[in-house]
Image: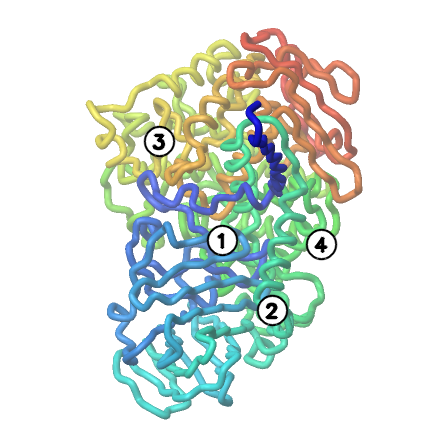
Amino acid sequence: MKSGMRLLLIFTIVTVQAKEPVDYVNPDIGGISHLLVPTYHTVHVPNSMLRFNPVKSPGISDHYLASRIYGLPINFPGHRQKPVMSIMPLLGNLIVDLDVVASDYDHDFETVTPYYYAVLLEENEIYAEFTPSQRSAVYRFTFPESAPAHIIIRGEDQVEMTIIDDKTVAASELINGTRLFALLTFDHPFKAFGSFDDNDINKNQKNVAGNNSGLTVSFDLPDKVLQIYYGISYISVEQARANLAEIVDQSFETVKHNGRTLWNQTLGQIRVSGGTEEQKTVFYTAFYRTFERMVNITEDGHYYSAYDGKIHQDDRPFYVDDWSWDSYRAHHPLRLFLAPDQQADMIQSYVRMYEQSGWMPSFPQVYGDMGGMIGFHQAAIVADAWFKGIRNFDINTAYDGLLKNAKQGAMLPWREGATTALGDFYREHGYFPALDPGAPDPVPEVNVFEKRQSVAVTLEHAYDDWCLAQLAGSLGKEEDRDMLLKRGKNYMNVYNPATGFMSPKRQDGTWVEPFDPIKSAGPGCREYFAEVSSYTYSFHVQHDVAGLMTLMGGAQAFVARLNQLYETPMYGYCRWHQTADIPDGTGMVGQFVMGNEQSFHIPYLYVYAGEAWRTQKRLRMLMDTWFRNDLMGICGDEDGGAMSAWTIFSAMGFYPVTPGKPIYVIGTPLFEEMSIQLPNGSSFVVRAFNNSAQNKYIQSAKLNGVPLNKAWLTHDDIVNGGVLIFEMGPRPNKEWGGAEPPPSFDFSK
């Protein structure tokens, strides 16, 4: 080394902060739809009454692709529904025209997490931030100049707003007959204020009532920063003020930190290791989405119920916003071991809705039942909880409500209430009668667009009746049990042995012919099916897979039919021919529809035929293909946690094929290790040695050190805690899991 030269060695120690579960969440996954409805980057805390996503365009669309923000909401009362009231910051001249006030934005200057949102509103260079609590939230706006700064508070339907003092606004708006109240407090006094109707501003007016109206408040902001704290309520403005106490003395950063902490605690119930960073992102994003619903609307021991229009005193949480047709399959079952007490509260909420309205609702919203889809799948939700040991709800009243739906309900798609001639026919003959394609329906109660969906109605009610039969047997109601068990076999009445497909049958007992199992009558096959074709619905017998297998000719024929499902090409010479007729059929693999809930259990059915390795192969392909960390990374309508719950189960390595039976069918674990922290203090751990993209096949398994040669688990195996170990390999062990298929539990006796 030359004289005078010095060697300078600099050692830099870089500390890399380990990711916490919430850091993996990417709310923009699925922000562009494949065909129908995208996901939304909802900001909220788990199961909270207050939810946020920016109002980027009117109605339902690919919000991610929208170029302007029209408002920042006070609340979204229901998943995928319009906001109730919104606010918008403005600088300079005061205008209220919605199209003029709307601002361009850029995703590169937008931040979205479960607990915090920020965006640069480019028209006025205003930086908007938001962070929520359970029933309250805070906005923070940073303006480029101190004055004149404005806030526009807007509503659409029977709006009522009042300026209470120089820092406080009371506001409310009606949504389908239910009023949402809000109390907003500002950290700077108003310099000026006014009201507006449509686009006409009335200066110095403190009150407004009407449609498409609101208030404006203006400020001088020496520090260029304005904060708005607000609480919401379905009871009153004063209750909104009480709900605001959740955060009113906290800084913006404290509310944000508390939200982050709560999400980490919630998502930390399941810890995964191994796999790729992309797979972890998909997993925790799906997990976050399962906590959007149901929504707890109890406020200080009271809740407003739209089911009788009254305010009730009850410290037990009252939950709304559920789509049971979507959520009974995986969303509700996920809570049964993660949050059994919460699940009991949700079921008891259904019970109270029945007591207050006279019917068990199917799609309960804050404003009442939406009456969506078909079936009465609360039967599956209640039976699943009951037979998995959750008993903290009024089972007798729940049963009475479910039996009323089964014996007296309308049975029509998208309609609740008393029976019709078609429901009476089903109860007498064991199937829902079909019309010839395009024939006008003589039953006036049938929805003109949704049609009869005759085969799907028969199949889904057969399953619900079976679930209710199990409850009847458990409660000692033998006459009901026998009647319902018989109805649980009604799926056989729409299986046509000549074609091997579930098929429409006329009122006179003859089959509708000719019948195309791919292209059935009506958009979304709605004359005979619900949104997808007979290829999917021919496997819609979750409660009696063994019986279905016998109908189809035994195990080998059943496997061949499953393979046919995945291998039958779309008709026509390109994709649009099929999607034009079946727009809900997204995520297609042959005729298999990954993007709709009716298909969720189908990849697991190979296990019942003794070929678990085929389930393992199909699942990895489906997860890798259709659930990714990108803007089109969800292949169908996510439905507020329903599809995400399927993703969680399938990544963990097991799935509840039959809600109502306390068993889970084993698929293939996605991660090297997965640990579920159970509420009883124990944990259930799944370890997959030598797991990789190629090593997807289970070679052998042990449960708590004992060899496991069957491809299913019981609910007790999980909730009692333990360790499930898989040895994975690149080629299938075709013997593993084949000797003992999932049992046909019957709890009705």
Dividing the picture into quadrants, the one containing residue 512 is top left
Q: CA distance from mark 2 to mark 1?
A: 37 Å
Residue 149 position within the rendered picture, expressed as x and y whole percent measured from the top left? 37, 78
Q: Earlier in the sequence, mark 2 or mark 1?
A: 2
Residue bearing the label numbered 3: 533
Q: Which residue is mark 4?
A: 394
* Above or below, comparing residue 164 to residue 735 in the picture: below
Q: What residue type is disc 1 on?
A: Phe
For label 2, the residue is 251
Q: CA distance from mark 4 to mark 2?
A: 42 Å
Q: Viewer-nearest of labels 4 and 2? A: 2
Q: Nearer the viewer, mark 1 or mark 4?
A: 1
Of label 3 and label 2, which has the lower sequence position?
A: 2
**Of residues 486 and 359, the one drawn nearer to the viewer in this rendering:** 359
Is any atom of residue 432 visible in this view? yes
Q: Residue furthest front?
A: 3
Q: What SS does tag 1 mark?
A: loop
SS at mark 4 in the image: loop
In which quadrant is the N terminus drawn? top right
Which residue appears farthest toward the left when viewing the image? 573
At 33% across and 38% down in the image, what residue appears?
Answer: 34
- The image position of residue 678, as x and y in percent, is 74, 40
Instruction: Label 2, secondary structure: give it.
Output: loop
